[in-house]
């Protein structure tokens, strides 16, 4: 397995998440990615994907009153051609099956099915009843990569949920 | 009714909704903390504008209808903003009866395929004709 050197880690953060922290992380990422050549679209896509995945965790923590929990977010430049994003957060065991099911839908859905799901999500009023959020759908559509998910037991009622995805830099 | 004139901030776009000069534009980044609160007054404004035009043309039937063009030129949009922009577009659809021609100009920065894609997706979901243009 290829060893990731320190210089290739764009960002490594452990701590709480709120809107301001999220924006500081996005700002740090934007500064870092500006140093790399590449298309405007790809640079913006990196910010967008990272922000949506952070927002997804943040919204979950707010919904479940878990704001005291922390996250761990890492962005790694791999082989100078891909950005790997990893975000881990606390996930209640009671929510785990639904979450796995949602990610399976995202990972197995064809682009045309995901666009339909995008339209459904865009038009619905009540977010709580319909599975994956808009952000996770658009991230999958834009990156074209499946989500990798991994669960580790944290305690009796909680798991650690690790989510990974990849952005091609097209360098 | 009053016009809306909002300066861009770090996370929210510049907005001009001017019913006197007929200038309607949203430009910049849209990633506010609470997208619903940001877009709610804009959505209401379009509702009010629709009523304003209804009474204008009802009370003065000889008034010539004008073209209404809403310009969107966004460089970054979070998913929560997308949802609210869609609601705004649906309200804009309702202005058709009060316009000579109603259209959306969806502009994207050159090379920003994702923003172009957003415009394409929206254009399939609303009735107002979309012009999708590179800046």
Image (cartoon, helix red, strand yellow):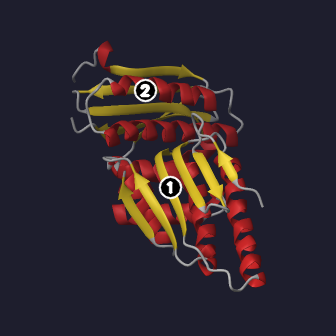
Q: Residues within 10 Å of mark 2 (few under 14, many from 20)?
A: some
Query: Could you tell me which quadrant the C terminus of chain A lies in?
Result: top left
Q: Secondary structure at mark 2?
A: helix
Mark identifier at residue A29: 2
Q: Is residue A91 placed above or below A78 in the rendered structure?
A: below
| Residue B18 drawn at (x, y percent) | 65, 58
The chain identifier of the residue carrying mark 2 reads A
Q: Residue at x 74, y 82 (%)?
A: B60
Classify residue B7 by image quadrant. top right
How far apart are the two marked residues, 2 and 1, measured between alpha carbons?
A: 26 Å
Q: Position of A122 compared to A157: left or right?
A: left
Of badges 2 and 1, the one in the foreground is 1
Number of disc labels: 2
| Residue B56 drawn at (x, y percent) | 74, 76
Where is mark 1, residue-wise?
B72
Badge 1 marks a residue whose secondary structure is strand
Q: Quadrant of the N terminus of chain A?
A: top left
Q: Residue furthest bottom?
A: B61
From this viewpoint, is residue A110 visible? no
Picture residue at 55% right of the left edge, 30% below the top: A23
Depicted A105 relative to depicted A32: above or below? below
């Amino acid at each position: 397995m290829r060893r990731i050197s320190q210089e290739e880690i764009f960002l490594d953060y452990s701590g709480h998440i709120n809107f301001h922290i999220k924006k500081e992380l996005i700002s740090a990422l934007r500064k870092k990615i500006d140093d790399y050549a590449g298309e405007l679209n790809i640079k913006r896509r990196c910010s967008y994907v990272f922000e949506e995945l952070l927002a997804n965790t943040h919204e979950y923590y707010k919904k479940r009153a878990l704001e005291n929990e922390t996250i761990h977010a890492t962005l790694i430049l791999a082989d100078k051609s891909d950005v790997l994003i990893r975000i881990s957060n606390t996930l209640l065991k009671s929510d785990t099956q639904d979450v796995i099911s949602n990610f399976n839908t995202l990972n197995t859905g064809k682009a045309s099915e995901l666009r339909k799901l995008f339209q459904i999500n865009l038009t619905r009023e009540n977010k709580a009843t319909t599975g994956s959020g808009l952000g996770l759908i658009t991230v999958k559509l834009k990156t074209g990569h499946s989500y990798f998910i991994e669960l580790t037991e944290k305690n009796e009622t909680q798991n650690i949920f690790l989510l990974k995805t990849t952005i091609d830099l097209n360098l | 009714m009053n016009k809306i004139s909002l300066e861009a901030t770090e996370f929210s776009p510049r907005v001009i909704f001017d019913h006197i000069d007929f200038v309607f534009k949203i430009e910049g980044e849209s990633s506010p903390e609470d997208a619903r609160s940001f877009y709610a007054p804009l959505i209401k404004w379009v509702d009010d504008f629709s009523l304003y035009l209804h009474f204008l043309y009802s009370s003065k039937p000889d008034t010539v209808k004008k073209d209404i063009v809403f310009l969107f030129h966004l460089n970054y949009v979070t998913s929560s903003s997308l949802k609210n922009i869609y609601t705004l577009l649906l309200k804009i659809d309702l202005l058709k009866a009060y316009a000579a021609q109603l259209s959306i100009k969806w502009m994207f920065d050159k090379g920003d395929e994702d923003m172009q894609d957003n415009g394409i997706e929206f254009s399939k979901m609303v009735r107002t004709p979309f012009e999708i243009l590179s800046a």
